[in-house]
Each structure stands twice: as structure tokens, then as C-alpha cells.
Amino acid sequence: MSRSASEIIWAPAVAPESGRHPGLDPRVEHDAGMIIEYDVPVAMRDGTKIYVDVFRPEAPGKYPPLVGWGPYGKHGYISYDAMGNTGINDADFNRYTRFEAADPIYWCRNGYVIINADMRGSWMSEGDLTWMSEQEVDDMYDLIEWAGTQPWSNGRVGMHGVSYLAWSQWKVAAANPPHLAAINPWEGVSDFYRELAFHGGMRETLFCPMWQSNTHFSKTRVEDFLAMQRLHPLYDDYWKSKNADLSKIIVPAFVVACWADHGLHLRGTIEGFKQISSEHKWLLVHGRKKWWHFYQPESMERQRQFFNRFLKGVEADNHVEEWPPVQIEIRERYFVGDMRSEREWPLARTQYVPYYLDAASGTMSTTAPASESTARYDATRYYDEGENGGNLSPFYAGAIADALATGTAKSRSEDGGRVKRATFEVTFAERIELTGHMKLRLWVEADGSDDMDLFVALDKIDQAGYRVPLCYFGNHNDGPIALGWLRVSHRELDEQKSTSYQPYHPHARELKLKPGEIAPVDIEIWPTSILLEKGEKLRVTVQGSDIYSYPSEGHTCGHTDTVNKGDHVLHTGGRYDSHLLAAVVPPR
């Protein structure tokens, strides 16, 4: 049995000065029309002090505060330059703008107060550092109430920011602090098991270690997320404790997601929009690079209009109430696509069309093949040099070397030229749009094992036979349409939460395969949008390793600890209704 959520494994902290923290230096400065108060202590309900920086307009008055809550250091620790290929550089920002957070100069000039917090246990703030815990909810609640009652505050507090700064919004908004008046979750996980720590039941092993290494600066101790991840391989009370009850969120919300963020924020952001109970809520989904998009002038103007409406009560200079409930980018290729207004998500006019797989021909069709056939591939390789990599960083090279040493993976030189994947394609006779949730139904057999890790990618192939690249994971230009994952022992479905187009796996137990067993599995394909022209193809790839992973990059997603052994066998046709259920959207 797993431990309760209260039994945390702690990791030794790294001294704040190792993260370039200068130490506490309470002071007040004036610059760019701002009064800047550094290292302001704010007492939590148990007396623990956290430290915040406050940026407010010099002109006397009462202004709405925007709170940015996260572990990355209000002094500025993480660099966009270090990420690489994000579309933005550190030189693009003034010295006050922090990673994934608001630009204080912009917001103060527009009549707002910016509060950047070092959460409990991070950097110089007192206490132990935990992730998305009930303690963290209490602390955010207390800071919001503090901000709402200061002499310079108008009493209407908003929350703002990307990634962790969005995760935190889901958590505290569900607690409904009285002074919280609006949230703007910009690309944030809301289910920490299914979207961050495990994908389809497979432990994520590249992004999570990188993330923990950037968030372990403390004077005390830090929750060891990686140890807890290993200790809790199933969805249990530990993971439930990290997820907000989204249905309890009632504040106005402007929710922004990115089709490109498969493996991190995409699913959780859209699920957040779907499940919150807010009367006033809007969803915008784009296909560009996430950090670049957040700081674009038009994006900042949308943010300003939204907060003006709900934090200032300004109605004359914006039309937020007239915004369409949903705006989505219909992508064609990298950085090419048009925004479109919709009334709901998922789109009510969606037609869910099955495209049946035929292993004999490697094709898909709306007609199920009468004859049974199989596709077989070697499940044990997970990294092809040159496919998505190049030179490996020492960390990821070590992770791959460990997997090779333990026999859980084979290098290209050891595979004897065996087939690594199965692919299926359909050529469209007319223009088609795929937008929404999709699923892949497979009938699978493990030859040489009692379990399988399945990795799925959807790609667009142009009329000349070339794969069409798309933005991916915030700093890549050659990504897929969509991804999906499933460990076959986690194939059990929650029938009440599943829909015909979106399977929901409880991940509560393992159901191992028997020798020779052919089992049906439903794989959730994370939501997407793509336009394909006449003569273009949709390709489905299935294999036993990450299809889009960049081990040489510091910011990537991957799964180097698979259960795969031997061969995977996919069964199609006849008794085996293996198919992709595609979200086809007809023109209005």
C-alpha cells in the first residue's frame, strides 16, 4: 500500500546562494514610475513568514494586485536563453520581469500592483517546501487576503502567470478566498499524475528531474518529488491531494492553452476550462511557442482587458463580455494557422469518425478490413541517434546508459535491423479538419512480456510525402499533431468518466497480460487541431519508445524506464476493430 499524502519523503535543500540569491535585503526603490518594495515579510496563519516583492504605481491610489506564485525565485533565476529556441531571449525583458511572470513596468503603468512571491520553503522564505499541498493552498489563500487588504489595494485580487504560476491558480481558486476576483491560468497542468508525473501510467523521467533540479533551493528541506513519483506508481491519495476540485472554482477565468504542449500543460489546461464552474470563463488555444505567445503585445492586451473587467470593473474600454467563449487556432504547419471563434468545447458539431487500421497494408480507412492481420515491432529500443537527438547532455546520456545496462533498452547497433514501429496512413480525398479529443483503439499482444508501454503519434504528411512540422513543447519546431501514451496494465477504464472519444483510466491497479492474450486498449490522444488538404495524409505511429523526445535538450519530455521486452504485436481487421476515432469538424 502507498503512504498517505502526509508522509512526505524529503530531499536535502540546495543553499539559495547556489541559485544566485543575494540574501534578504528589505528596501524600497523608485524606478519607471513604480514604488518597489523588496523582501516584504508576510505572515501566514501559523506565523511562518514568506517574502514577496511588491511593484506598485507611484501615483497615489488603490489598485488591484496581481499575484504570481511559484518556486523559481522572485530574484530571477531561470533563463530563457538557457532553454534555447523559445522565440524569446533574456534581452527582450526589463530587469524586473521574472520567468513565466508578469512584466511589472507594463502592469504598473496600466494601474496594477504586481506581487511576486517566494512560496513557503523556497529560497529565503521560512518553512518546508512542498508541491501543490494543502499547506500551499493555505499560504496562497493567506497571501491573497493580505494583498486584498493593504492600503494600496482596491480589494480585488487576480492571479497571473504561466506553468507553475498557473498550477497554483487552480489549487487556490478552488478554495475561493474572498478577495480573489479573477484568474488567468496560462498553460497549467491540473492533473499531476496524468499530465506531469505519469503519461498513460508511464513514469516521466526527463522533464521531472530537470524541474526538481530548478526548484530545490531552500534553507530547510524540499519535498522529493522524484522519490514520491517512484513510491506512488498508481493514482492514489498522494496524487489526489495535489489536484484541485475544479468544479469548486467559480471566479471569472481567462484560460489559455497551447496545442504544442503535449506531454505537459495542454490536457490539464483544457480540462480545467471544461470542469470549472465559473459563470464567466473563456478559453483560447493557440499553436505557437508558449512563452513567446504569453508576452506578445496582443496577448498582454487580452490579459489587461480581462483583468480590467473583473478587477477594476472597467466596461467602457473593453468588450470582454462579448468575447466568444472559445477561440482556437486551426493549424496548418509550423506557425501557420488561423484563429476561429467557437461557442463551446468540445465543438458540438464534431463528427467522430473511425478510421480502421489495416496491418497488412499499413493503411487506415473508414471501412473495417474483413481480413485479420498483424503488425509486429521490436519494443525494446527507445532512442535512435539522429532521429530526435544528436549529442546528448551528460544527464540524459546517463539515463539512457542506465537503461541499456539494465537490459530495458537496445541501441541501434544491437537491434539487428528489426522494425521499431508500426505506421498507418490515410490519404484524404478532400480538405478535412481534425479538431478535438481523439482516441486510438488497439488490440495488442505482448510477445515475451506480460506488459506493454505504447507510444502513439499523429503526423501530417504533405502531398510530396514529407512530414509537416509543428511547434512542440515550447522550444521545438518539428513536432507532431498529437501524442498519446498507455501502459497496457493500466488499460482499465472508468466507465462513468470515459466518453466515446476520451477514455479515462483510473490507474488504480495493474492488469497484467497472460501469455498469448490479445487485449483491447483505448489510448487517449491529447486534444489537437490540424487542417489537411486534398491529397495530404494522416499518419499514426505506434512504437515502444518516445516518438518525440529530445534527450540532448534541457527542456524535454521522455520515458526512459519502460516495461517493454520482446515484441509488440498489433491485431487489426476481422474480430479486431483497431481504429483511430478522429474528431472531424465540418464547416459551419
Image: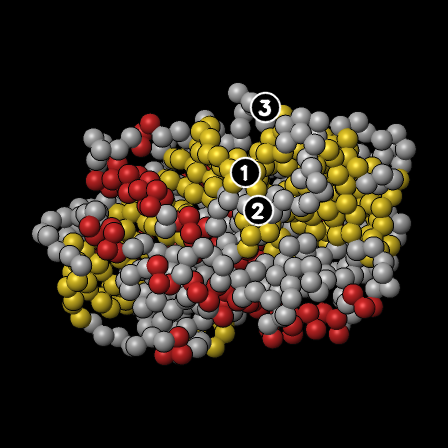
Label 1 or label 3, whichever comes before in sequence order: 1
Answer with the quarter of the image where residue 561 lies.
bottom right
* Separation of marks 2 and 1 at Cα, in angstroms: 8 Å
For the image, the number of numbered tags is 3
Front residue of this view, candidates 416 and 523: 416
* Residue underneath mark 3: 586
Please tell me the numbered disc located at residue 331. Answer: 1
Q: Amino acid at mark 3?
A: Pro
Judged from the image, the secondary structure of the residue bearing numbered disc 1 is strand
Rendered-image quadrant of the N terminus: bottom right
Label 2 or label 1, whichever comes before in sequence order: 1
Residue 573 lies, with reference to residue 167, above or below; the image says above
Label 3 or label 2, whichever comes before in sequence order: 2
Front position among marks 1 and 3:
1
Judged from the image, the secondary structure of the residue bearing numbered disc 3 is loop
Please tell me the numbered disc located at residue 470. Answer: 2
Q: Position of residue 567 (x, y in %)?
A: 84, 55
Q: Position of residue 422 (x, y in %)?
A: 79, 48
Residue drawn 78% across the image and 65% down it = 412
Q: Residues within 10 Å of mark 2 (few under 14, many from 20)?
A: many
* Separation of marks 3 and 2 at Cα, in angstroms: 23 Å
Position of 433 compared to 447: left or right? left
Residue drawn 63% across the image and 58% down it = 549
Position of 335 compared to 577: left or right? left
Q: Position of residue 179 (x, y in %)?
A: 25, 46
Residue 231 lies, with reference to residue 150, above or below; the image says below
